[in-house]
Image (cartoon, rainbow, N blue to C red):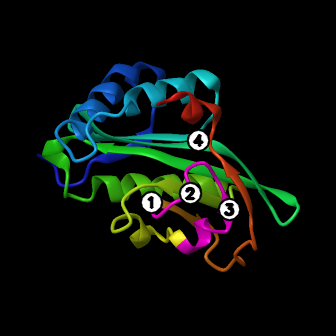
């Protein structure tokens, strides 16, 4: 097995492989399968994808990350924003830095697009290593507010907004 999978933008023909990676990644975990694969398909169908990347190990897709458009208002203005969800890595590739590489490459692409802030709903011990902060997220009203809701400024030197509202793409509200 190669040490470092290649990261590339997802293509239309990757849909089934992405679906399989997501289902395998969440099967048997504390989270179980909660419709992440269906969520990805809905975000794609709605046209709300900002960044969708895959990791290829050999000839197979072994990881995927999706960043979708968010509607974020703060301090009286709209901020270009993204929501990270989900990040998935095939079980045999977990713990080898694949998720890390996907998230970091996604952040780079978001910066190139002029996205200012990214949100995630996830494990509070995992996402802070990328710069996500529960403290920053508490400044935003959101149906997902709570200890697992985190945000990060993609420009580490940018001032944190004072407060506002953060809404995920409509597909998130339809899942449940």
Tell me the tag on residue 145. 2
Is 141 included in the stretch rendered in magenta?
Answer: yes
Q: Is residue 125 above or below residue 87?
A: below
Q: Using the numbered discs, state the Cα–Cα distance from disc 3 to disc 4 in whole angstroms.
A: 18 Å
| Disc 3 packing (10 Å; few <14; some 14–19; many ≥20) | many
Tell me if label 1 and label 3 are in contact, CB under 8 Å. Answer: no
Residue nearest the observer in this picture, 152 or 107:
152
The crowd level at tag 2 (other Cα within 10 Å; few <14, some 14-19, many 20+) is some
Q: Which mark is residue 168?
A: none
Give the left or right position of residue 65, taking residue 70 as reference.
left
Residue bearing mark 3: 140
Front one among 37 and 29: 29
2 and 3 marks in contact (CB < 8 Å): yes
87 up-or-down from 112: above or below: above
> Dot 4 corresponds to which residue?
68
x, y percent for residue 50? 61, 41
**Where is mark 1, residue-wise?**
148
- Tell me the SS state at disc 3: strand
The CA span between labels 1 and 3 is 13 Å
Looking at this view, is 67 or 101 the one in front? Answer: 67
Which numbered disc flags the more N-terminal residue, 2 or 3? 3
- The magenta segment: 135-148
Q: Local crowd at mark 4 within 10 Å, few (<14), some, or many (≥20)?
A: many
> Dot 1: what SS?
loop
Report whether 59 appears left or right of 83: left
Q: What whole-number distance in Å separates the C-alpha atoms at marks 4 and 1?
A: 18 Å
> Would you identify the image quadrant in which residue 169 lies?
top right
Q: CA distance from mark 2 to mark 1?
A: 8 Å
* Residue for point 59% across, 65% down: 137
Task: Indicate yes or no whether the magenta region holds residue 37.
Answer: no
Label 3 close to label 4 by CB (< 8 Å) = no
């Amino acid at each position: 097995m190669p040490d470092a999978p290649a990261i590339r933008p997802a293509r239309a023909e990757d849909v089934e492989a992405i679906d399989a990676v997501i289902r395998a990644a969440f099967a048997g975990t504390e989270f179980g399968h909660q419709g992440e694969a269906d969520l990805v398909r809905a975000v794609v169908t709605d046209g709300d994808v900002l960044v969708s990347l895959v990791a290829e190990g050999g000839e197979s897709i072994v990881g995927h990350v999706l960043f979708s458009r968010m509607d974020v208002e703060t301090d009286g203005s709209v901020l270009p924003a993204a929501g990270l969800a989900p990040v998935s890595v095939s079980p045999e590739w977990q713990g080898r830095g694949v998720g890390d590489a996907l998230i970091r490459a996604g952040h780079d692409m978001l910066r190139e697009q002029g996205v200012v802030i990214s949100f995630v709903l996830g494990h509070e011990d995992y996402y802070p290593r990328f710069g996500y902060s529960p403290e920053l997220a508490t400044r935003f009203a959101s149906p997902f507010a709570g200890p697992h809701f985190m945000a990060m400024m993609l420009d580490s030197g940018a001032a944190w907004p004072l407060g506002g509202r953060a809404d995920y793409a409509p597909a998130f509200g339809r899942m449940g």
